[in-house]
Each structure stands twice: as structure tokens, then as C-alpha cells.
Image (cartoon, rainbow, N blue to C red):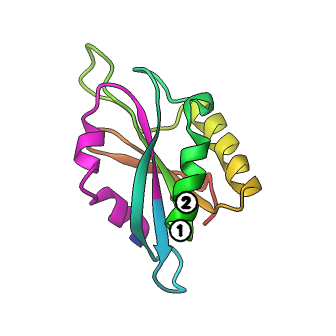
């Protein structure tokens, strides 16, 4: 597991996010600790958008908040994180990205690129698991 993933998953807000009944998206802002790949420490986080019980879409994301926080914190990189809540009546959820998650992630990545912000990963969590776009080769670090 990469250092920044471990740091994010142990952050104080994660237990709250894992147990939400609706999807929410967060931006975790990172500072580089060394030249070792993935060696970042969390320097801040902010809620970026709400969805419903099914998805967070790019049009619900506060890009202004995302950009302002990135530059105010003088972040070196950012990781998106959102939860997949259990569907009503189900006993489990899945952290696998939906088609909407894939499309949304790449739309946000384009926005980050055009604003000179470095998006290094998107992590999806449920009550007990996580999915990293980097670890699953959907984004290159």
C-alpha cells in the first residue's frame, strides 16, 4: 500500500465517510515528504460534492472550492475520495468503480490538469474496503 493511501485511510474522517447513507466526495490535499513514489502526507481535506444514494457526478463537484483549497494549502497533489454506501435492503456494497465513477474521475482530472493541480488518485471506500485507481492501474502515479 502506498504511503498516501495509508495516511488517507487512517484519517479521522474516514470512519464517518465509510458509514454514510449517501455518496459524498472529498478532496485530500497532500504534501510531498520525499522523492520516493507515493510518499505524501495529508495536509488538509474538504468536502467537494454530494450525490444521492447512487452516485456523485462531476456537475455536483465544487471546482471553485477544490482549486481554492489546493492553492491555499500550497498542496503538491490531491486525491479524490468518495464512498459507496450500502443500498437499502442490501447487506453489502462494492468499491468497484461504476461507469459514472470512471467518466467523472477523468472529467475532474482534466479540470485539475487545466488548473495546474496534480490529481494522483481516486479512492472509493465502503464500510470495510477500498479501491484505488492507482493500485488498479486506472491512473498512473
Please say whether residue 9 is one of the residues in the magenta stretch: yes
Residue 42 at x, y percent in the picture? 39, 66
- Secondary-structure class at tag 2: helix
Which residues are the magenta region? 4-28
Query: The N terminus appears in which quarter of the rendering?
Result: bottom left
Mark 1 or 2 closer to N-term? 2
Residue 73 at x, y percent in the picture? 49, 66
- Secondary-structure class at tag 1: loop
Q: Considering only vertical position in the picture, is 13 above or below 56?
A: below
Residue at image coords 33%, 19% = 87
| Nearest to the observer: residue 9 or residue 51 | 51
Q: Which residue is mark 1?
A: 75
Q: Considering only vertical position in the picture, is 27 above or below 21?
A: below
Please say whether residue 131 is one of the residues in the magenta stretch: no
Residue at image coords 65%, 44% = 108
Residue at image coords 54%, 70% = 74
Q: Are marks 1 and 2 in contact (CB under 8 Å)?
A: yes
Residue 113 placement, left or right of 124: right
| Nearest to the observer: residue 14 or residue 45 | 45
Q: Which residue is mark 2?
A: 70
Q: Based on the displayed image, in which of its 4 quarters is residue 140 positioned?
A: bottom right
List the single residue furthest toward the top: 89
Q: CA distance from mark 1 to mark 2?
A: 5 Å
Query: The C terminus appears in which quarter of the rendering?
Result: bottom right
Q: Is residue 30 visible?
A: yes
Q: Considering only vertical position in the picture, is 41 above or below 67?
A: below
| Nearest to the observer: residue 93 or residue 125 | 125
Amino acid at each position: 500500500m502506498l504511503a498516501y493511501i495509508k495516511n488517507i485511510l487512517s484519517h479521522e474522517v474516514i470512519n464517518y465517510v465509510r458509514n454514510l447513507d449517501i455518496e459524498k466526495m472529498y478532496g485530500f490535499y497532500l504534501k510531498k515528504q520525499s522523492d520516493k513514489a507515493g510518499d505524501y502526507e495529508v495536509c488538509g481535506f474538504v468536502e467537494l460534492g454530494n450525490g444521492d444514494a447512487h452516485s456523485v457526478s462531476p456537475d455536483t463537484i465544487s471546482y471553485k472550492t477544490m482549486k481554492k483549497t489546493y492553492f491555499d494549502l500550497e498542496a503538491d497533489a490531491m486525491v479524490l475520495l468518495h464512498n459507496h454506501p450500502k443500498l437499502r435492503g442490501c447487506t453489502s456494497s462494492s468499491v468497484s468503480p461504476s461507469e459514472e465513477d470512471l467518466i467523472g474521475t477523468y472529467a475532474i482530472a482534466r479540470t485539475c490538469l487545466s488548473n495546474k493541480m496534480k490529481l494522483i488518485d481516486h479512492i472509493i471506500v465502503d464500510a470495510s474496503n477500498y479501491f484505488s485507481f492507482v493500485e488498479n492501474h486506472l491512473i498512473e502515479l
